[in-house]
Amino acid sequence: MSQLNRNWSSYFYDSFSRTQWMRFGAGPYRLSAEALASLKGINEPMSVSDVAEVVGPLCGLLDQQLAANPAQPYVIAVSGSVAVGKSTFSRVLRALLAQSNRTVELIATDGFLWPTAILEKRDLMHRKGFPESYDLESMLSFLANLKAGKRDLRVPVYSHEVYDVVPDQFQTVDRPQLLIFEGLNVLQGSKDSAVVAADYFDFSIYLDADPNDVENWYIDRFSVLQRTVFQRPTSYFHHYKDLRPSQTRETGRKIWRTINLPNLLQNIQPTRERATVILRKGRSHAVEEVLWRHSMAD
């Protein structure tokens, strides 16, 4: 965080170093190395100690929040930049919280992106991930119906390989006790609507990191994808399959700086201080600091 934001946030958050935070204890919330490996995304490292020292204690504190707010479903939002590790974190959080015999669902907001055909028609493919690239009405309708206790809600399935919503494929959500709602702009407000997604959240987590570090993580991930997924003819990015390593990194850097960095700075990062908890990552991807909103500890 910038010094200005750190000074401002000190009025709203308690700051814990990793060593201080781990003293809350993980309790039963732990994962084996094998179980953790099955949950990790591409270039999203997380160690068993990360689970025990950061995510486990967070789950213990969430237990206290759940006891104080028994209304179901309890909705937890997870936000942060592209390539900051939201997907892996959310899958790990879901796996841990399910250990207490709760029904826990995970929904990624990618399923609420407008299909590619619509984005192309509106000249928005270069703005994919920006607020205007989402079907906000459908997203808010899903959250409202979820909180109203409606059954068998359907969320469109998104394919990162084809870079599009998959026609006629849905994830069904049937009144879970907890739902984790993960996406780039889930904490954003709106000038055009009196209702925003955050109105339906009971708890929110923002994964934070220096944008320069996130750029490097994005480029590293893009390079891995170029050698693997992009080689498949079904990949939307198959046209990158023959790039040399230096060309791959330069292409990834260009995409980051022209699309993902502007979205981070304009739309995602400004919502950071709306989160209940901010997890601050260092260069190695490990969480080094936890900011915990004062109201939680009152």
Image (cartoon, rainbow, N blue to C red):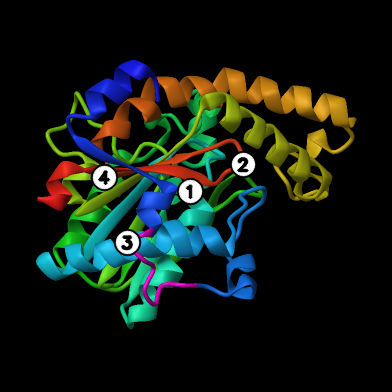
As measured in the structure, the alpha-carbon distance from the residue carrying label 3 to the one carrying label 2 is 23 Å
- Sooner in the amino-acid sequence: mark 3 or mark 4: 3
Residue occupied by mark 4: 292
- Sooner in the amino-acid sequence: mark 3 or mark 2: 3
Residue occupied by mark 1: 86
Neighbour class for label 4 at 10 Å: few (<14), some, many (≥20)? Answer: many
- Disc 1 versus disc 2: nearer the observer: 2
- Disc 1 versus disc 3: nearer the observer: 3
As shown in the figure, which amino acid type bears the numbered disc 2?
Ser
Q: Which residues are magenta?
A: 23-30
Name the element at disc 3.
loop
Measured as percent of width and height from the top left, residue 272 is found at 32, 33
As shown in the figure, which amino acid type bears the numbered disc 3?
Phe
Name the element at disc 4.
strand
As shown in the figure, which amino acid type bears the numbered disc 1?
Lys
Quarter of the N terminus within the rendering: top left
